[in-house]
Image: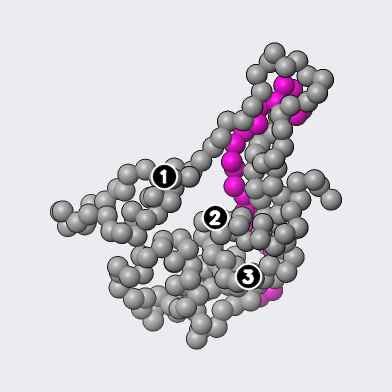
Amino acid sequence: MSHYQQTDRRALYAVLDQALVAHLSIVRHGCPMALPVGFARDGDSILIHGSTGSAFFRDVAEGQEFCVNVTHLDGIMYARSLFDSSMRYRAAVIYGRASVVSAQKKEAALLKLAEHLMPQRQREIRPMTQKELAATMVLRIPLETASVKDNRASSPDEPNDDHSVWAGTLPLHVVAGEPETSSATQSGVAPPESVLTMKARFTTQ
């Protein structure tokens, strides 16, 4: 087992709960394919959604085996050799098969997704229509087979290196910019609380 491997379930939850995007990978007609998707953790599973017209999502819904990857790039580690230089990261990989969320539970699942991706937004906008719900597929992915790696504790220092050469880490962060109002929004309408909440989340890291 890698010394970066994490076995505490809370480490897996932390990687997932702090991320907004995952990459879902399958093999379709003999070709590997990967698709970025928004997601949210719901207990011991994650939820993703897509169009009912998507052949990719239909394959996953029908039991196609998949791999899901979530990665946080926290920095670049500059060691005193290229061999020892690396990236600071936290990553989770999930394997398995998905199940389709039933029509009766679909709206609640989509609201769970929305609350993770855009906290509080659902309070500010109209409800989903039946047509929109019918056009959307929600898949539940169990976290039964998952692994987590976290190398943030790794060091760029090796005992036999030339310590007169600088070594260290360049931290990297996702940072929110200023909200950009759509052209059709009425003049004077300010960004709502949901946007300011999300902006604060990516400003105070």
- Relative horizontal placement of residue 190, taking residue 31 as reference (left or right): left
* Residue hosting label 1: 203
The 10 Å Cα crowd at callout 3, few under 14, some 14 to 19, many 20 or more, is some
**How far apart, in angstroms, are the residues tagged by discs 2 and 3?**
15 Å
Q: Could you tell me which residue is drawn at 68 percent across and 15 percent down?
A: 165
Return the residue found at the far right.
1
Q: Could you tell me which residue is drawn at 48 percent across and 67 percent down?
A: 113
Of the numbered discs 2 and 1, the one sitting upstream in the chain is 2
Report the mark closest to the observer, 2 or 3. 2
Report if the CB atoms under discs 3 and 1 are less than 8 Å apart: no
Instruction: Give the image quarter of residue 167.
Output: top right
Whole-percent x, y for residue 119 in the image: 41, 63
* Residue hosting label 3: 45
Q: Three-letter amino acid code at disc 2?
A: Gln
Judge by depth and name the residue closer to the eye, 141 or 112: 112
Whole-percent x, y for residue 77 in the image: 65, 31
Whole-percent x, y for residue 83 in the image: 76, 27
The 10 Å Cα crowd at callout 1, few under 14, some 14 to 19, many 20 or more, is few
Instruction: Give the image quarter of residue 97.
Output: bottom right
* Residue hosting label 2: 18
Return the residue found at the far bottom.
104
Report the mark closest to the observer, 3 or 1. 1
